[in-house]
Image: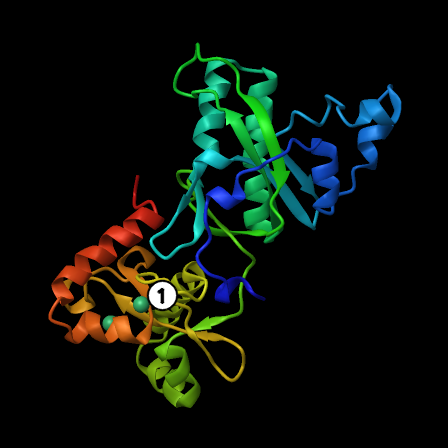
Amino acid sequence: MTFHTSPPQSLESLRPTVKDPVLDLVRRAGHDVSDWSASSSRGAAGARTNPKYCYEWAFIEPGAGIVLNLWHQALSVTPAGQIVHRENFRADADALALRSPGSPRARRARRLVEALETAVREKLTIRVILNDGRRRDLADPHSAASSVTKRQLDPEPWTIVSYDWATGEHVLRRGAVGPAVVDQFSITADLGGTARRREHSGFVYVREARVRQAVLDRSAGRCEHCGVSGFRCPDGSLYLETHHIVPLHEGGPDVAENMIALCPSHHREAHYGECAGELRSRFQDQIRSLVHVGA
Ligand SMILES: [Zn+2]
Ligand SMILES: [Zn+2]
């Protein structure tokens, strides 16, 4: 897996430069597209533009993966240099269902939500077709329809960083699910800490472990402050340290939004540095920009 050691990615290098047929892109993503030609009455050439499929925004290969159409202009880069897509497909689908119930666009928007939620539930692989062109303004019912001028399959798979089942907001990150990421507590747990702590407060420990792991997964092995990769442990996992931004003894909540995965150096600095206070507010901004809190 080269993702974790690759340099921070640039958005411009991902801008599509050609307009490939959707059929070819979905096939290249590993999906079975034999259905596309089977249901086309116009033969092979017609199949490439089969309207039953080629205007869809998402494709599901059951048990395997999904392909999502995303706008290049909707991508952003996190402070740690990761490329992410943050939107709310469900809110868009709900708005469309109200405005034009039963329309093809409303149906496609619903399928997009279904695809993403299926991927979250079944942990499916996510591939992305990046689109460039003019995007319809969803807030304006009179805005012109979207038109795609370029589209290409991103060669990298994508990962779901977070999906809020309550609101529908998601954060997707470019790159495969990486190697395991561990922190200072995983290491001491291996040295016998787990058993000792479990005796005292089993529930708290288990819950905390789940939250810490969510933070480590979110980091993809990079310090969420500076973007440097954690060092590699003998078992291949990457080492970072989890840190409560507002400490628990100051009333900080034990939730992923109050935690950050840091390289050991930034973790020490957060505790002992002269700019510890400044770092705290930087961390808060950085995590807020990555995860929607409440909304
Ligand atoms: Zn760092
Ligand atoms: Zn700490």
Quarter occupied by the N terminus = bottom right
Say which residue appears at 43% left-offset and 57% top-offset: 8
Whether residue 158 is visible here, answered yes or no, is: yes
Which residue in the rendered view is the most extreme toward the bottom?
Answer: 191
Q: Between residues 279 and 119, which one lies in front from this camera angle? A: 279
Is residue 100 toward the left or the right of residue 284 in the image?
right
Whether residue 165 is visible here, answered yes or no, is: no
Q: Between residues 124 and 241, which one lies in front from this camera angle? A: 241
The secondary element bearing badge 1 is classed as: loop
Q: Position of residue 282 (x, y in %)?
A: 21, 56
Q: Between residues 40 and 15, which one lies in front from this camera angle? A: 15
Q: Kindly tell me whether mark 1's CB lies below 8 Å from ligand 1.
A: yes
Q: How is the image coloured?
A: rainbow
Say which residue appears at 69% left-offset and 27% top-offset: 54
- If the picture is divided into quarters, which one holds ligand 2? bottom left
Q: Is residue 189 above or below residue 79?
A: below
Quarter occupied by the C terminus = top left
Amino acid type of the residue tagged 1 in the rendering: Cys
